[in-house]
Each structure stands twice: as structure tokens, then as C-alpha cells.
Amino acid sequence: MRTVVPVVERVVETPSTITLRFDDPRTARPGQFVMLWIPGDDELPMSLAYVGARKGVTVKAMGSTSRHILDIPVGAPVGIRGPYGTSFDVSPGRILLVGGGSGTAVLAPAAEAALANGSTVTAALGATTRAELLFEQRLRSAGASIAIATDDGSAGERGYVTKLVEGLLAENEFDVVWTCGPEVMMQKVIAAARPKHVEVVCSVERHMKCALGMCDACSLGPYHVCVDGPVFPADRIASLPEFGRSKRAPSGRSVPA
Amino acid sequence: MTVAAVEVELAGIRLRNPFLLASGIWGESGESLKGAFDAGAGGVITKSIGAEPRDGYPNPTIEAYDTWGMLNAMGLPNPGIEEYPREIAVALSAGVPTIGSVFAGDADSFADVAKRMAATGVLALELNLSCPHAKGLGSEVGSDPAEVERVVRAVVCAVSVPVIAKITPNTADPVALGLAAERGGAAAISAINTLRALAIDLTLRRPVLAHGLGGLSGAAIKPVGVAIVWQLYEALRIPIVGVGGIRTADDAIEYALAGARAVEVGTAVAFGGIGVFGRLASELPLRLDALGFSSWAAAVGAAHPRSASAGRTA
Ligand SMILES: Cc1cc2nc3c(=O)[nH]c(=O)nc-3n(C[C@H](O)[C@H](O)[C@H](O)COP(=O)(O)OP(=O)(O)OC[C@H]3O[C@@H](n4cnc5c(N)ncnc54)[C@H](O)[C@@H]3O)c2cc1C
Ligand SMILES: Cc1cc2nc3c(=O)[nH]c(=O)nc-3n(C[C@H](O)[C@H](O)[C@H](O)COP(=O)(O)O)c2cc1C
Ligand code: FES
């Protein structure tokens, strides 16, 4: 069911990213998403960056609707349906988290839950520049160790976060890697983890309409990302011809990713 | 113990069971069509395909209620008939009995896109005459019996596969539409598409769906579908495909009793997953047995007074 609730907090996370908090008592697990309706504008899938009773979505300005979301003030009504989809298994383990850009939004609540369960978490965070790093402080205070890469070298290592991943995998033992970001990035993470036989779990995005596993908008090979995902074990999706290469446009046409 | 036979023949197509995937559900990708068949469907109907790619309406496109129903205004998103044959090829090469659904704004364009759909190798066509929420398309074509007859005749002349006309419930006289399609040469009628409906958010004081009006589907519309199938069965000679709100084998048998030779299942996929087809297929023979029918075919039209079904082939 859909509920319409007011935004109760608005947090500027980076120059291009904000978090909207709202109260919604429904149970949600880290990795799940909601359909966020901006009345008068679009309704978009957004991962839950906070999964408790005071939920939150962390939105990066991309196209017209997400830019509009950045301007939404406290008190404004938004529509919420969900939570939908699969989640991360947060049972205790040694976890490497690899987030590119706003991909870190979905990993943060999973990391917090895993740390609370006694896991160790190392977070490799990538961003274009220092100011765009997302949830570095949040993850640090939850107890994760942090490694950083920025495209311009303004923080951490210069270059892509995938460069850090190879080193981290070589020097540490991990049970699992959780990753969310551009599919080319996730492909590199999968490739880096394969020789070490470390399991990789990805959160992927596809165009969504119903979010109920019905309309087929979000199909990815034999899967529907809205119900079979968005969180997938990499071995289920890495070899699909679409992964990292194509996605479906709103019309259902296959277009380059 | 004998188990009731559930195979059916519809417009020359043999189906292992009467459950077809309804148009618009799991129908954009070939792998999904195949997935629905693998899950247990007797056959599949594609997403309604038009001449050109269409994005459909913006979100929100869906308002889901607790399992009793759902409102949608997708706006006929589809990749267009140029691109779509590659999806059908995936289903056909896997041996999936596939029916191609098409839509257009008038008889000539219907014939055009139907010809191209038929060329993909689909076993039959379903004409979406009834989409109640696509401006200038479905509804206006499908609510006028004369236009329905023109469209069906144009398509029947253009293709050599059987043509199923899917009619709208948003009319005072669905039987007139069915008779028009029969006169036009349709091999079967499917009924019903969604019922025009609206949801308004109380706090926002505005319609929820971006398009405003939408179409109601799911359990809530089953009695409407059963009634229209009943009326069509009394008036028509061609077979009828029942659709609207089917979730259980008993729902399907109710449609059969009203006169449906086969049925389509759509919204139940949203609430029960694609596994609903496997459940329906395994429940059906057991329920037919329990109700004293030797086969699905024996149940078709069985609730009608004998006079109405006399002379029919169903
Ligand atoms: C499961 C899931 C979780 C997501 N979580 C987040 C998140 O936590 N934070 C965040 O900033 N973004 C997230 N996104 C992406 C978000 O839904 C939008 O795609 C993005 O905000 C751009 O939307 P736009 O309308 O501003 O851009 P547009 O200019 O409309 O389009 C830009 C891109 O957004 C995509 N897009 C537009 N509408 C949809 C839609 N209905 N479904 C999917 N993609 C769409 C387009 O395909 C295009 O690639 C998530 C997407 C999915 C599928
Ligand atoms: C999301 C959605 C999309 C649909 N798209 C189409 C379509 O493209 N063409 C069509 O003929 N019917 C379409 N329909 C109507 C269904 O095929 C079916 O007639 C209707 O939903 C009633 O059946 P149900 O209650 O089992 O869903 C759609 C229905 C839904 C819910
Ligand atoms: S969004 Fe409709 S099937 Fe996933």
C-alpha cells in the first residue's frame, strides 16, 4: 500500500546528494528499496539508506526528477510504497564493501546491521572528489575501516575505487564483498574477487514501474530486479549478456547500459 | 482414479492447460515469456505491441490494493514492432505457444502491425481493442461496434493466423462488440480488459496515477468478467477466452462454466508470483475431479441452460 507522509528531516550529504527522512513503521531490511513518489512529478525506485521506523533515502542529482528531489523541503509530502526486493545477509562475517558514488547509500545500513551483529567491515568508497564522498563519517562511527579513492586525488588514492579493491583483497581475508555502483565498476569488483574465491553480492538498478514483478520493465535476463533483486549474488548475474552492457528503456527496448 | 483432462484447443492452437499469460504481464522480454511458460502457463500472450516504440505514461503507473485489485495506467509502453520480433524469437525457439498482442489507432494501422506481428511466427494474434487508458487508441476503437468490425475484418484479411479480439468492458453493450468481432471474422473473443477506474489521494487531493484515470484489474473484477463471458456465450458461436481476476482453479472453472474455453491470468502474478501458473495447473484437474467434471472441456458452458449451448462446438 502507498502512504503519503511528510519529509521530517533533510540532510545535505554532498554538493549533489541529500537524504530525506520520513516516518514509516513498516519493517524493512538493508538492501530493500521503496518507490518514492514526488506528487506532480515522477515516482522512482530509491534504496533505503535508513531502514528503521524513521526511514531515509539518499538521492543524488542525476536527471530532472532527482534534481527536483534535492529541492524538496521539510514538511513536503512524499508518497512511499514498499519496501520491496531482496536484502543483504547481515549475519556475522568479514565484509568488504565497495561503493561507487550514490551506491554507498544502500550499503551503509547493511554495514551498520552487520557491524551490530559482530561483523568486521572494511569500506572502500569511491567518488569524483573529496566533497562527493558519501557516508564516510557514518561508516567510520559505526566501526568500519575506510579506504578512499577519488578521481581527482583530493582524498585517498587517485583513481577508481576498484584499484583499492585489488589491494584490499590481496592483503586481507574476506568472506564476502558487497558492492553497489556502476555496472562496469561492479564487473571489475567481481573479476578481482574471483581468483580469491570470495563471494560477491551486487545491488543493481533497472528501470522500474510496478515494482511488483508484473510489468516486466525491470527484466534482467530471467530475473525481475524489483522482486528477484535488487540484491543479487554475483554468480547469478555476472554472466548475463545484459550485465554491464545493456538495460531496458521505459519502452522495453534494449539500449546500451 | 481418473484425473480430469485439462488440455484445450483454442482457435486451432493446442494448449497443455487453459491458463494463458495475459497481455501486459511479463511480456516485454522473450525470456520472461519463456519464464511464464516454464512456470506452468499453457501459453503466453505478448505485451501489446504498436507500430512505434512507446515509453508509456510516467510513474506512478500502478496503485496496488491489498490483493483484491489493482489500478494501472501503463500507457501501452512497448518497444515497437521493429524491435519486438527478437523477443518473440526467444519464446518461439523454446517451443512456447505464443500469441502476439497488437494495438493501433485505426483499421489500416491495425492491419499493418498485425501483418508484421504474424510474420514473427506467433500462433495467433490478440487485438487489444480495449485498453481503456490510451488516448486516441484502444478505447475509442474498441467501444464502437462498427469500428471493431472494421478493424477485425482488416486484420483477418491481412494475416493467415487466427485472430482473437479482446474487448473492453467499458461499454453498455459488450455483446454488441462481441457480435461485431464475430462478423468481422474473429476466431475467438477474449474478455475482459481492465475497467475504467480512479484513485484519489485524500491528503494530496489529487489522482494518484500520473495519467489520472486507470484500469482496474484483479479479484475485484472477476464477477464482471464472468458476467460478460456469460452474455457472450449466449450470443456468439466462436470460442471465448475469459480474463479478469483469476487467482485459483475455482475462479477459472467459474469462467469455464460461464462459457470460457481458455482463460488468461494477469494481476495474480503481482500478488502470487509467476508460480501462480504452476499452482493453477496442478490444482485444476483435482478441482475438476472434485466437482464431477471429466475434463476442462466438459465444464465449458456447463452453467448455461442446455438450449443456449446446443449447436455450439465448445
Ligand atoms: C533499486 C534501485 C535503487 C535505487 N536507489 C537509488 C538511491 O538510493 N539513490 C539515488 O540517487 N538513486 C537511486 N536509484 C536511481 C533512481 O531511481 C533514478 O534512476 C535516478 O534518481 C535518476 O532519475 P531521474 O528521473 O532524475 O533521471 P532521468 O533524467 O529521468 O533519467 C536518468 C536515468 O535514470 C533512470 N530512471 C528514470 N526513471 C527510472 C525508474 N522509474 N526506475 C529506474 N530508473 C529510472 C533512467 O533510466 C536513466 O538511466 C535507484 C534505482 C533502482 C532501480
Ligand atoms: C500492468 C498491466 C498491464 C496490462 N497491459 C495490457 C496490454 O498491454 N494489453 C492488453 O490487452 N491488456 C493489458 N492488460 C490487461 C490484462 O491483460 C487483463 O485483461 C486484465 O488485467 C484483467 O485480468 P487480471 O485481473 O487477471 O489482471 C494489462 C493489465 C495490467 C494489470
Ligand atoms: S518494475 Fe515491473 S516487473 Fe519490476
Image (spheres, coloured by chain):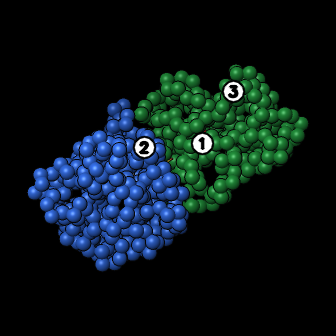
Which mark's residue is nearer the viewer, 1 or 3?
A: 3
Residue situated in front as seen by the camera: B235 or B1: B1
Name the amino acid type tagged 2: Arg
Q: Earlier in the sequence, mark 1 or mark 3?
A: 3
Q: Which chain is blue?
A: B
C-alpha span from label 1 to label 3: 19 Å
- Left or right, B262 with respect to B173, comes to right
Are the residues under badges 2 and 1 in a single subunit?
no
Q: Residue at x 53, y 63 (%)?
A: B94
Quadrant of image for the C terminus of chain B: bottom left
Q: Chain of mark 3?
A: A
Mark 1, ligand 1, within 8 Å: the answer is yes
Q: Which chain is green?
A: A
Under circle 1, the secondary element is loop
Give residue A201's position: percent from left, percent from top.
69, 40
Q: Residue at x 47, y 35 (%)?
A: A81
| Circle 2 residues within 10 Å: few <14, some 14–19, many ≥20 | some
Residue situated in front as seen by the camera: B290 or B249: B290
Residue A197 marker: none
Q: Residue furthest front?
A: B1
Disc 2 designates what residue?
B279
Disc 1 designates what residue?
A230
Q: Are marks 2 and 1 in contact (CB under 8 Å)?
A: no
Q: Chain of mark 1?
A: A
